[in-house]
Amino acid sequence: MEEAEMVTPGEMLGRATELKAGKGAYVVQHNKNIYASLTGFRRIQSPPPDSPDQRPTVEVTGHKAHGPVPEPGSVVIARVTKVMARIASADIMCVGPKSVREKFSGIIRQQDVRATEIDKVDMHLSFRPGDIVRAVVLSLGDARAYYLSTAKNELGVVSAESSAGNKET
């Protein structure tokens, strides 16, 4: 077994052609490199023998990485921080029932707000800064944010403030 190496966010962990990105890691698409998104220890997991993808998985564990980490398919609770014409930015506060220990950013793209009539979505009518949303993680995105979706009936805004300042739930 190899010696565990301490890594910090942004540090290169390997190439996506040789490894898969696991928890605490992400792939930058333009250069196919895998980088750490957390401070912790670099670990390589062997693939299960029956897995069609036989690349080992590289992940960051331990240190601050022991809290919950968003991953594709996870349901998250996030606070909307900024709304623009095509995207809304949000800070992820919980992954499943557990609150996160580190700051994770998410982006909800216009096409991921709802399942139908995607072209008619008005981001400013869908979200306001301060809204609390339930969303599912689509992908690890890039170094800056996870891609989130609210395009299911059980997802979307769970708490908001009206333009008059009243709490809406």
Image (cartoon, helix red, strand yellow):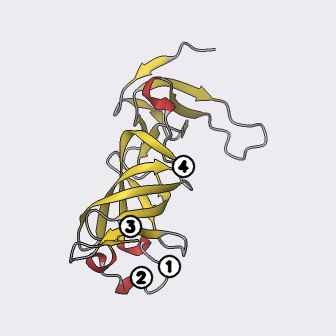
Q: Amino acid at mark 4?
A: Pro
Q: Which mark is residue 118?
A: 2
Mark 1 — residue?
A: 115
**In this view, 130 is above or below 27:** below
Q: Looking at the image, is mark 3 or mark 1 earlier in the sequence?
A: 1
Residue 96 at what x, y percent from top left?
54, 51
Residue depicted at 28% across the width and 72% down the height: 86
Distance CA(mark 3)–CA(mark 4): 17 Å
Q: Looking at the image, is mark 2 or mark 3 earlier in the sequence?
A: 2
Nearer-the-camera pick, 90 or 59? 90
Distance CA(mark 2)–CA(mark 3): 23 Å
Q: Quadrant of residue 82?
A: bottom left
Name the side, left or right, on which 41 lies relative to 103: right
| Secondary element at tag 4 | loop
Q: Amino acid at mark 2?
A: Ile
Q: Which mark is residue 159?
A: 3
Mark 4 — residue?
A: 97
Residue depicted at 34% across the width and 45% down the height: 143
Q: Residues within 10 Å of mark 4 (few under 14, many from 20)?
A: few
Name the side, left or right, on which 109 lies relative to 74: left
Name the side, left or right, on which 48 lies relative to 37: right
Where is the N terminus found, in terms of image quarters?
A: top right
* Mark 2 vs mark 3: in front: 3
Label pair 1/2, CB-CB below 8 angstroms: yes
| Secondary element at tag 3 | strand
Label pair 1/4, CB-CB below 8 angstroms: no
